[in-house]
Image (spheres, rainbow, N blue to C red):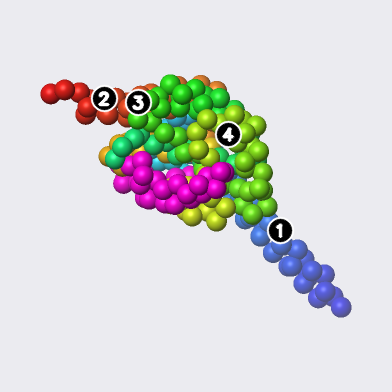
Amino acid sequence: MKKTPKIALTISTRIGVAALVAATLTCLVACARQEGASQGGAGATTGVSGASVGTGAPASDFNARDIEGKNVKLSTYLGNQVVLLNFCATWCEPCVAEFPHLRKMYEANKAKGFIILAIAMDGPETVANVPAFARRNQLNFPMLTDEDSRIASLYNPKKSAPLSVLIDKSGKVVAIREGYNPGDEEFLAKDVAKAIDGIARENAPQ
C-alpha cells in the first residue's frame, strides 16, 4: 500500500515532463514560423513557403474548367501571353481585398498580351459558391475551379491564399508572391510590367 503514492508520483512526473517538452517544441515551431515570415516580408519573390515551383522554373501545363463550364488549358497562353495565376478561395478575405487591384491590372494590360487566370481552391463543400463569388467581386478575367487540387499540387501545395504565380511569354515562372497586404499590388504591378516589357522588346523592330 505504501508503494502506490510513489507510482502515482512517477506517472505524474512523466506526464509533467511530456507536457513541458510538447510546450517547448510548440514554442520553437511558432518562433521559426514568425522568423520566416519576417524575413520574407511583403512582396518577397523567392523562397515562398506556399509555392511548389520556384522562380526560373518552367510552368507546368494543366487543364481546368472555368465557371462557365469551358475547358481552359494553360498551354494555350504559353508562348503568346504573360500569365498570372492567382490562387484564391471563397473563404479568403485577403483575396477579396486584392481583387479590385487585379481587375484594374488586367484592364490596363490585356491588350499588351496579359491574362489573369484565377484559380479557386474550394473543395466539394464550397465549389458551388465559386460562380456567385466571382460575379459578386466583378471579376473581368477567367475564374477556374480546382476542386480536386490538381493545379494547386503543381504550384501551391500548401494552398496559400492568395498566392500569385507570374509566368512570362517563354513559359518561365518569373515571380511568386504570397499573401496580400495593402500596397502589395504595387510590387506585383512592377513584376507584370517587367514581364510585359519583355514582350514589347521582343516585338520591337530591329
Q: Amino acid at mark 1?
A: Gly
Residue pointed to by mark 2:
200
Nearer-N-terminus badge (2/4):
4
Residue at 52 percent across and 34 percent down: it is: 179
Q: Earlier in the sequence, mark 2 or mark 1?
A: 1
The nearer-to-camera label among 1 and 3 is 3
**Amino acid, disc 4:** Cys
Which mark is in front, 4 or 3?
A: 3
The amino acid pointed to by label 3 is Lys
Residue identified by numbered label 3: 112
Q: Residue at x 56, y 25 (%)?
A: 100
Reply yes or no: does residue 75 show up in magenta. Answer: yes
Picture layout, residue 83 above or below residue 62: above
The correct choice, above or below, for 14 with respect to 44 in the image is below
Which residue type does callout 2 highlight?
Ala
- Of residue 157 and residue 197, the one placed in the foreground of this image is 197
Spatial CA span between label 2 and label 1: 66 Å
Q: Can residue 176 be seen by looking at this rendering?
A: no
SS majority, magenta: loop
Mark toward the start of the polypeptide (4 vs 3):
4
Quadrant in which the N terminus is drawn: bottom right
Mark 4 vs mark 3, CA separation in Å = 25 Å
User: Where does the magenta region start and end?
Assistant: 50-78
Residue 186 falls left or right of residue 29: left
Residue 77 visible, this angle: yes
At numbered mark 4, what does the secondary structure look like: helix, strand or loop? Answer: helix
C-alpha gap between disc 1 and disc 3: 64 Å
Q: CA distance from mark 1 to mark 4?
A: 43 Å
From the image, tell me which residue sits under label 4.
95
